[in-house]
Image (cartoon, grey):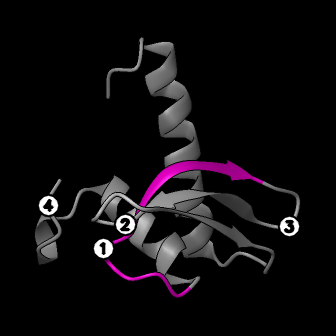
């Protein structure tokens, strides 16, 4: 996936929305994510491969809901297809 302007895939945009709202930069990627009663949590990976944990307990705005739905539904669908994305 690429991160230059309009070439961003919906998944990359969703990751940027959710991680950006928590203060993580564009170099961060989501490795795993799950919905919680308060928001979402998961693990991320920096460009150098180091991992970090993240969690949001704030009320989600409309854009964050879209991003979370895209990532959680997309991962479930890819698991049903044998891991192919």
Q: CA distance from mark 3 to mark 2?
A: 25 Å
Q: Nearer the viewer, residue 85 or 65?
A: 85
- Describe the element under mark 2 as helix, strand or loop: loop
Question: Where is mark 4, residue-wise?
Answer: 2
Residue range (magenta): 23-35
Mark closer to the chain start, 4 or 3? 4
What's the residue at 42%, 11% (across, down)? 82
- Describe the element under mark 1 as helix, strand or loop: loop
Mark closer to the chain start, 3 or 2? 3
Q: CA distance from mark 3 to mark 1?
A: 26 Å
Q: Nearer the viewer, residue 68 or 49?
A: 49
Relative horizontal placement of residue 54, taking residue 59 as reference (left or right):
left
Mark closer to the chain start, 2 or 1? 1
Question: Where is mark 3, residue-wise?
Answer: 38
Question: Where is mark 1, residue-wise?
Answer: 27
What's the residue at 42%, 62% (across, down)? 50
Relative horizontal placement of residue 6, taking residue 30 as reference (left or right):
left
Question: Where is mark 2, residue-wise?
Answer: 46
Residue 40 to residue 77: above or below: below
- Describe the element under mark 3 as helix, strand or loop: loop
Mark closer to the chain start, 1 or 4? 4
């Amino acid at each position: 996936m690429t991160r230059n302007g309009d070439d961003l895939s919906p998944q990359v945009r969703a990751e940027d929305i959710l991680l950006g709202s928590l203060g993580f930069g564009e170099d961060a990627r989501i490795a795993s994510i799950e919905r919680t009663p308060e928001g979402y949590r998961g693990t991320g990976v920096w460009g150098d491969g180091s991992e970090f944990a993240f969690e949001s307990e704030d009320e989600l705005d409309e854009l964050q809901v879209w991003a979370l739905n895209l990532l959680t539904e997309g991962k479930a669908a890819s698991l049903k297809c044998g891991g192919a994305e």
